[in-house]
Image (cartoon, coloured by chain):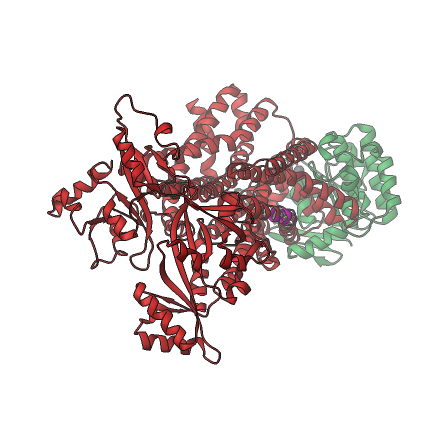
Amino acid sequence: MILTLRVLLSHWRHAPLQLGLLILGLALATALWSAVQAINSEARASYSRAVEQLGTRDLPSLTAPDGDIPLATYVALRRAGWQVSPVLEGVWTPAKESLTLLGVDVLSYPGAALMAQTTPATGLDPLAVLRPPGTLYAHPDTLAHVLQDTGPRVMALQELPQGIVLTDLSVAERLLGTSGRLSRILILPDQPMGLLPLTQLVPELELSTTDDGALGDPQRLTQSFHLNLTAFGLLAFGVGLFIVQGSVTLSVEQRRGTIHTLRCLGVPVATLIQALLLELVLLALVAGVLGLVLGYIVAGFLLPDVNATLRGLYGAPVAGALSLRPGWVLSGLGMALAGTGLAGLQALLTLKHMATQLTQASQAVARRRAGLIWIWAIVGLLLIGLAGGMLWGGNGLVAGFVGLAGLMLGCALLLPPSLFWALTFWLRMTRRPVLRWLIADSRLQLPGLSLSLMALLLAIATNIGVGTMVSSFRLTFTGWIDQRLAADLYVEAAGPQQAQAILTWAEARGARSLPQYRWTTRSASAPLLLYGVVDDPLYRQNWPLLRSLPDAWDRLHSKGAVLINEQLAHRADLAPGDMLALGPDWSARIVGIYSDYGNPDGQAIAGITTLQQRAVPLTLRRIGLVPPDGETPEGLAAALRQDLALPASAILAKDRIRAASVAVFDRTFVVTAALNVLTLGVAGFAMLTSFLSQWSRRLPQLAPVWAMGVSRRQLAGLELLRSLGLALLTFVLALPLGLGLAWVLLTVINLEAFGWRLPMFLFPADWARLLGLTGAAAGIAALLPILRLLHIPPARLLGVFSNDR
Amino acid sequence: MLLSVSGLTHRYPGQSRNVLTGVGFDLARGDSVALTGESGSGKSTVLHFLAALDRPDQGRILFDGHDIVPLADKPAAALRRSRIALVFQQFNLVPALTVADNIALHAHLGQRFDPEWTQTLIRQLGLAELVTRYPEQISGGQQQRVAIARALALRPDLLLADEPTGNLDETASAEVLRLMFRLVAEAGSALFLVTHSQNIARQCARRLHLSGGTIRPVGS
Ligand SMILES: Nc1ncnc2c1ncn2[C@@H]1O[C@H](COP(=O)(O)OP(=O)(O)OP(=O)(O)O)[C@@H](O)[C@H]1O
Ligand SMILES: [Mg+2]
């Protein structure tokens, strides 16, 4: 057994390049997979850190369907004997950045112990938290956004996630400007016996886990993003496996002679198979460790961009650093082993077949496999049908992704039969001898190449699909932002007085002002941002409405109606004409739905007069300005700066904001683009290995043609032509698949993940670029065999015609 | 003179002795020559040089008055494509193509395809029923006959055959030889045939024997 293994392993000494490619392929596959895993688990850990370390993980809590819980309800629960802890949660904007403020009762909050731990080091006794002006706790990075000189003391608490500020309930009430209202009531683990049931005490409240609080929100919202990354990682891993599959199968075929000899020496088939298995395990371990190292490096590179995406798109709090987790190492190695096993399956079958039937010609095997190609077609069509059903009938993110996977795999399976039939048809059509040979020869090579071509198909389709989605999104986004930024200038006010001063100044100057009053509230137990707008014609002209009732703006200003954004409409299943609950005794008619990209939260717009009548706590930070006729925006900005002594950074021209938003958008998709390129690279690599693995079988094909007067240079040209031709055909088939993928991403996945549906645009210039890239990959993959062919000594080719083939 | 060979000397890399030491002979149109010699004496090596498939260390091979030894790959290939046909000891056929396509391939490449002549060859060599099969689906002797049909279909100026009848029974080899001599007589080709069989060698116009790296005539 060991001897057999040693004989088998001795093969690699003569094929160091092949061994290198094999290990590199497997390592790359493992690297991409584990990089994605590392990123995902890092982000998840970030989200759950708060919940876990603050001790509120898995604690059930009570929430009100329409947002707030009166303090009296909490008091009633305490009186009834329930061990509960109140939480007030809200959006607080001390400086530029918006933060989530969590107000808790320090005596009963499960995470209070953690807060107390940090206190002695700073020389304060725990009760100081309660004394005015109170204490704010936040992650050290978040503290930078909190104005140090105003209000309460601030204190760093490493365990908190970024973007969250923890404080006492009374401080939170003061900062948020509310009183007597709670967002959640946590139910503590130990309860006395014989309590009245909650359904009887507080029937109006809903019982849930903390998942939909500020600490749990990111987990729910970013689920789609992580699923997306995982899908990408899995795809890259799958493509990498094609490389391994090609190299391992090849190595078995190359050892035909050795295997023959070992069989003649009396080594049983079982021992041979065990030895090969052992060899595979060895390779998998070496490549797996290498892949983990690579994956760690890749993850380190991508993590900042991923964090930017998570923060930009979802506002999710993520910490910046990567840490090594044992689970991650194990799962990476496990994937490498499982993948090698899967990829080695064909090699094992080949070995078994070879060891039992040593006299079979390899062409006969190839031709028999080609004869069975219609099975691929049937399985492919079945998968596509299933995927169609899944996308049509199923709902939810997982169904969408499963449908997508089925669609892609089905189309990939259809590729070899399509190529086979296309080549057969072409062979019938053409008379030119060299071309006929080339086509027939390509057809015979197809079984050996089909896996790498499938990998290429998947990579191209993903590139087109994801590229189309991102570009469509970008086009929609830029168009949308032009509509949304109706005013020419935007002024950021430092406080309410300044905001009022700006409004007064604008009126005196004859400029129109569009103040953005905001009110952060909750509706249907999810955060809702309500904007109050003035009645300005710019809104009627520009605001990007998707659907609306007639006279929507009139009804908004005179009848107290609201407009809601698309994600709120999708999530709460609301349509124009429905009612939106805004408080215990307040619901407003929805008169329209507008598109709103770049945040996952619910938003609504109401007339400012309506909000003022309801006396809701409004904040005003941003004011849009339109200069009067005859004045330029620059002039107005200069005058404003001078008259009100505003800092330059407080006044932003429309173009600046637009550019900044687009930059944020682009940064968001850097990771996607990087993964796209990597996948294509791996697919090119798969092609290279399969061309190389075909090479040893090529000589008997080439030698007779060469002897009949086709020069080596011509043969090399034909090889290049073949590689390019197959890549081109694959591209042609991948294009519709990619567009289908884009369609599913835009209309199914996006809707489920973000709550918005995007129109699809086509980008032929991108396709041309991708075609160029594909051609380059195919050309490079064919380069090595071509160079070998150009420099092969005639004696090697002549060797084909003597006994020692 | 179609072919005029002189002073061929060659040693394979890594070998201690020369395979050939000053081989020389002439071959005219309409002539047929049989080359005999022990196994490993260098017969196939000579044949490969004559087809410009490989290059001797020294010597000249004048084909129609031009030395083909220094030819680069491209002109050498062009020469084979239209004027020189080969039949090897084995593994002659292109695995990807059917028997019919294999037979027509060289003639098509040399742009000298003649459907009538090709049909005659297929019939006479008893291949009519095999034309749609692939090489690995027919026997060794059948493969050899396909290779001969392919070489004859080109009507080459020079036909080089390395043990073409090694795998054939007596009737089949007689038919193969008859067709080769017919080509030599009708088209004015020259035949250079390597064989172990004295019987076959005797049917050629002249006999040469290769031994110890040199060639000498046999018989008269
Ligand atoms: N590529 C090569 N490298 C090294 N030695 C070679 C090579 N090809 C042939 N030889 C050696 O050169 C000698 C002549 O070989 P060749 O094939 O010409 O013999 P042959 O006369 O055709 O023999 P046979 O009758 O068995 O076909 C042999 O000893 C052989 O081992
Ligand atoms: Mg020989």
A777 and A104: which is toward the camera: A104
Residue A426: x percent and y percent? 75, 46
Q: Quadrant of ligand 2?
A: top right
Can you tell which quarter of the image residue A641 is in? bottom left
Residue positioned 72% across, 45% down in the render? A437
A195 and B56: which is toward the camera: A195
Highlighted magenta segment, given as a residue range? A729-739
A505 and A642: which is toward the camera: A505
A123 and A7: which is toward the camera: A123
Which chain is in red here?
A: A
- Residue A222 appears anywhere in the view: no
- Left or right, A473 with reference to A185: right
Residue A215: x percent and y percent? 34, 42
In this view, A445 is above or below A760: above
Which chain is in green here?
A: B
Residue A234: x percent and y percent? 48, 39
Image quarter where the C terminus of chain B lies is top right
Residue positioned 61% across, 56% down in the render? A762
